Amino acid sequence: MTGRTRGEQTKAAIIDAALALFTERGFDATTMRAIAESAGVSLGNAYYYFRSKDELVQGFYDRTAVEHGERLPEVLDGLDGLADRLTAHLDLWFELMAPQHPFAVGFFRNAADPASPLSPFSAASAPARTAAIELMERVVEDAAPPVPATVRAQLPEVLWLYHMGVVLFWVHDRSVEQAATRLLVRRTAPMIERVVALADLPALQATIVDLTTLLADLKAMAG
């Protein structure tokens, strides 16, 4: 593609070939050799760019995050409410990931293993995780009415954790075009908006402090 270096084109071809084979054969049954053959590169060349299938999937995560970030301003344009912005953000994620749903169970089985580099909480996933939280920051930053300052700093990461829960539901959703997952988001996003709007109430201040302290402590222990 125009504007890409030869190396970038090769990496993209390897990722595209892998995704097609994952859909056809499943994640576990697809080998790096088959991916290389499908991409039209040598096995050594495939391993030059991706040392394993796990690393290749990380490349897919990163590419999806870039595309999501590029398209997000357009889908958020004209939306003010936090619930509407969060729903639009997740609808875009569903659109980008829809072609991968057929093999999603196998794809995310490894991600569910805490020891796997594919886990969204792993060190290897840190760039994709950071990018995803930054996208949530865009969702939050221009919401109207503004998000209360008491939860503003922590909310993007909390919403990312909510997104991870939605992903787990989506993986196992066998409704047509994952309509059940979309319904889940449309029903829960307004609940989140209402809870966030109450964050400045004095009665909730101690609870908010406790929750933010707990998140900080858990991150420190996991890190």
Image (spheres, rainbow, N blue to C red):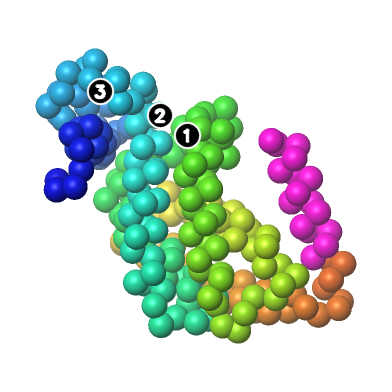
Q: Which residues are magenta?
A: 208-223
Residue 183 seen in the current view: no
Q: CA distance from mark 2 to mark 3?
A: 13 Å
| Secondary structure mainly formed by the magenta segment | helix
For image coordinates 50% across by 66% down, the residue present is: 138
Q: CA distance from mark 1 to mark 3?
A: 19 Å
Q: Which residue is mark 3?
A: 46
Q: Secondary structure at mark 2?
A: helix
Amino acid of disc 2: Asp
Q: Is residue 114 magenta?
A: no
Residue 36 % position (x, y): 20, 24
Residue 145 seen in the current view: yes
For image coordinates 29% across by 20% down, the residue present is: 48
Residue 54 % position (x, y): 40, 29
Q: Secondary structure at mark 1?
A: loop
Q: Earlier in the sequence, mark 2 or mark 3?
A: 3
For image coordinates 67% across by 68% down, the residue present is: 152
Q: In the displayed orientation, state which residue is furthest to the top.
A: 44
Amino acid of disc 3: Ala
Report the quarter where the C terminus lies. Answer: top right
Q: Quadrant of residue 209?
A: bottom right
Above-or-below relation of 140 to 36: below
Amino acid of disc 1: Leu
Q: Is residue 221 magenta?
A: yes
Q: Earlier in the sequence, mark 1 or mark 2?
A: 2
The mark found on residue 54 in the picture is 2
Q: Secondary structure at mark 3?
A: helix
Q: Are marks 1 and 3 in contact (CB under 8 Å)?
A: no
Q: CA distance from mark 1 to mark 2?
A: 6 Å
181 vs 29, left or right, is: right
The mark found on residue 118 in the picture is 1
Q: Residues within 10 Å of mark 1 (few under 14, many from 20)?
A: many
